Amino acid sequence: MSYTDIQEKIARFTCIEEALTYFDIGFDSTFINEYRTPLMKACYGYVLLAKPDDWFSARRAFKNGYCKIQRGRLDRHTRSACRGCTTCQRR
């Protein structure tokens, strides 16, 4: 799978839930509904920066975008762990 194949597949998604399901990333629908716009910007921004060439690198880009928004909600003064995504490696 090449970069253009991945881009075409991503362009066919009609909502962020389809992309997260395709890349096997667990998500919370209430979180998606509340942070839909920043989440889409973060995920697609990571895709543009990473220029993924296979399914795994595209998944990593989407997962990084999801985790970035999740971590942004955490209190910066405590050492709380990321609880929102089920696939987070930063637990």
Image (cartoon, grey):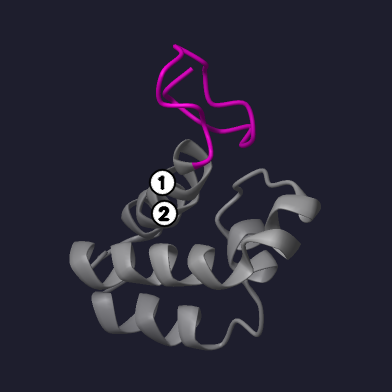
Name the residue that disc number 2 marks. 65
Q: Quadrant of residue 83?
A: top right
- The picture places residue 49, in percent across and down from the top left corner, at 20, 66
Q: Is 7 included in the stretch rendered in magenta?
A: no
Q: Amino acid at mark 2?
A: Gly
Residue, x 50% and y 66% (percent of image)? 38
Q: Mark 1 belongs to which amino acid?
A: Lys
Relative to the observer, which residue lies in front, 38 or 66? 38
For label 2, the SS is helix
Task: Estimate the x, y position of residue 66 in percent, counting from the top left.
Answer: 50, 50
Which range of residues does the magenta coloring cover?
73-91
Q: Going by the picture, which residue comes out furthest to the front?
A: 77
Taking 47 as reference, is 14 left or right? Answer: right
> Mark 1 and mark 2 in contact (Cβ < 8 Å)?
yes
Q: Is residue 39 left or right of residue 32?
A: left
Question: In the orientation shown, which residue stands out farthest toward the right?
Answer: 30
**The magenta stretch spans residue 74:** yes
Please say if 54 is above or below 79: below
Residue annotated with mark 1? 68
Q: Quadrant of residue 3?
A: bottom left
Quick one: quadrant of the N terminus? bottom left
Left or right: 4, with 11 as reference point:
left
Q: Residue at x 35, y 55 (%)?
A: 61
Q: Residue at the location (66% across, 43% down)?
A: 26
Seen from the viewer's position, the closer of residues 6 and 19 is: 19
Q: Report the residue that reaches farthest toward the top.
A: 79
Is residue 85 shown left or right of residue 61?
Answer: right
Measuring from the top left, give residue 68's x and y in whole percent. 41, 46
Q: Local crowd at mark 1 within 10 Å, few (<14), some, or many (≥20)?
A: some
Q: Dot 2 surroundings within 10 Å: few (below 14), some, or many (20 or more)? A: many
